[in-house]
């Protein structure tokens, strides 16, 4: 009778016989049979060839300290020195501020902005902020009061509040904004298109790189109440803002003529209004990025980049740039 595993076991035994005796002997036997100098070299070879055997060798040397062998050098990966210069090596770590008792706005920054009109109406600074926002809406001619329509939906509105801070943490001013409830708008009735281009990040980088290369001045402009400049194409009705309802016609609603914050089409209408004015004074849209507009006048060139209500303007003619800024300031309120 022939066993199928007879040959494999024989081959296994023959392979075992060919293994060097150095790998088959125990660590204690190797220490007794080899002199101290050769044993230290053998331990180093084993530690390099098989890192997993490093721990048993160390434990065996700790059990038999009378072997007279010098302890092997142990390298810890966590304490290895690397050539990278870090903030810890240069001692430039930021100090951890756990209890900053000297900061003058630690309480005001942690407190949340108010959200209830009844609570806000008790504070004069918030009433002043709401009055300033309502006055800006009236200046823009944002709406006109009409009787409530019988066959059209009326959007609601609400006040939002936010405290603005200086760089040192002190309170700069209190900002109140009237926001329409655009989540109740219906497509095809209250709005159609909503897409509004914004500047791409590569375009911003390229514009700043070109201005830096040619040493051109770069100015940043911010439009105050930008969305209020957009003209609405659709018929939109909104309730009167709380706290500022007309006492003679309290049941009337606001027929919006200009876009207001919160409407779905407000960013698009602002972009169309701004770019239409820029095209009227000689600017042209870039073919690669519609938010980049260029103006070439004689040998001068001016580049203007739009990101919602923030504008970057640069060029090789400072007088022409200042002239364009004055024209924009006459049409829009700029900062």
Image (tube, rainbow, N blue to C red):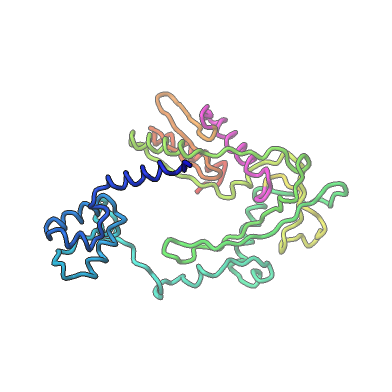
The answer to which quarter of the image holds residue 101 is bottom left
The magenta segment is: 260-289
Residue 19 coordinates in the image, percent (x, y) = 27, 47
- In the displayed structure, would residue 283 be above or below residue 104? above
Q: Which residue is depicted at the point 49% across and 72% down?
A: 107
Q: In this view, does 53 lie to the left or right of 335?
A: left
Front position in the image: 4 or 173:
4
Magenta stretch contains residue 134: no
Taking the view exactly as shown, the residue that stands out farthest to the front is 1
Q: Which residue is depicted at the point 24% across and 70% down?
A: 63
Q: Which residue is depicted at the point 60% across and 33% down?
A: 276
Taking the view exactly as shown, the residue that stands out farthest to the right is 150
Taking the view exactly as shown, the residue that stands out farthest to the top is 298
Q: In this view, does 90 lie to the left or right of 326?
A: left
- In the displayed structure, would residue 326 be above or below residue 99? above
Front position in the image: 235 or 64:
64
Residue 4 coordinates in the image, percent (x, y) = 47, 41
Front position in the image: 296 or 81:
81
- In the displayed structure, would residue 304 be above or below residue 258? above
Q: Which residue is depicted at the point 25% across and 57% down?
A: 25
Q: In this view, does 212 lie to the left or right of 47?
A: right
Residue 122 coordinates in the image, percent (x, y) = 64, 72
Q: How many labels does the image show?
A: 0
Magenta stretch contains residue 267: yes
Residue 67 coordinates in the image, percent (x, y) = 16, 67
């Amino acid at each position: 009778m022939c066993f199928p595993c007879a040959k494999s076991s024989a081959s296994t035994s023959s392979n075992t016989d060919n293994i060097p005796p150095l790998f088959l002997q125990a660590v204690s036997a190797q220490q007794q049979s080899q002199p101290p100098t050769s044993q230290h070299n053998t331990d180093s070879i084993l530690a390099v060839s098989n890192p997993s055997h490093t721990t048993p060798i160390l434990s065996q040397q700790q059990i038999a300290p009378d072997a007279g062998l010098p302890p092997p050098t142990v390298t810890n990966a966590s304490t290895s020195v690397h050539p990278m210069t870090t903030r810890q090596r240069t001692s430039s770590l930021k100090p951890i501020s756990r209890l900053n008792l000297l900061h003058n706005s630690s309480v005001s920054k942690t407190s949340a902005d108010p959200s209830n009109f009844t609570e806000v109406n008790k504070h004069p600074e918030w009433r002043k902020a709401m009055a300033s926002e309502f006055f800006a809406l009236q200046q823009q001619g944002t709406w006109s009061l009409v009787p409530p329509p019988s066959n059209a939906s009326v959007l609601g509105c609400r006040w939002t509040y936010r405290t603005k801070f200086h760089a040192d943490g002190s309170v700069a001013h209190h900002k109140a904004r009237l926001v329409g409830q655009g989540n109740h708008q219906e497509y095809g009735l209250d709005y159609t298109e909503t897409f509004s281009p914004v500047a791409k990040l590569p375009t911003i980088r390229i514009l700043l790189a070109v201005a830096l290369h040619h040493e051109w001045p770069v100015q940043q402009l911010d439009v105050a109440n930008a969305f209020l400049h957009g003209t609405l194409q659709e018929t939109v009705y909104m309730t009167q803002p709380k706290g500022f309802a007309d006492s003679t016609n309290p049941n009337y609603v606001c027929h919006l003529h200009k876009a207001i914050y919160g409407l779905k089409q407000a960013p698009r209408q602002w972009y169309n209004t701004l770019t239409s004015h820029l095209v009227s004074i000689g600017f042209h849209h870039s073919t690669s990025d519609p938010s980049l507009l260029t103006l070439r006048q004689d040998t001068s060139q001016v580049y203007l980049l739009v990101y919602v209500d923030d504008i970057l303007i640069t060029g090789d003619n400072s007088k022409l740039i200042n002239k364009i800024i004055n024209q924009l300031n006459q049409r829009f309120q700029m900062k």
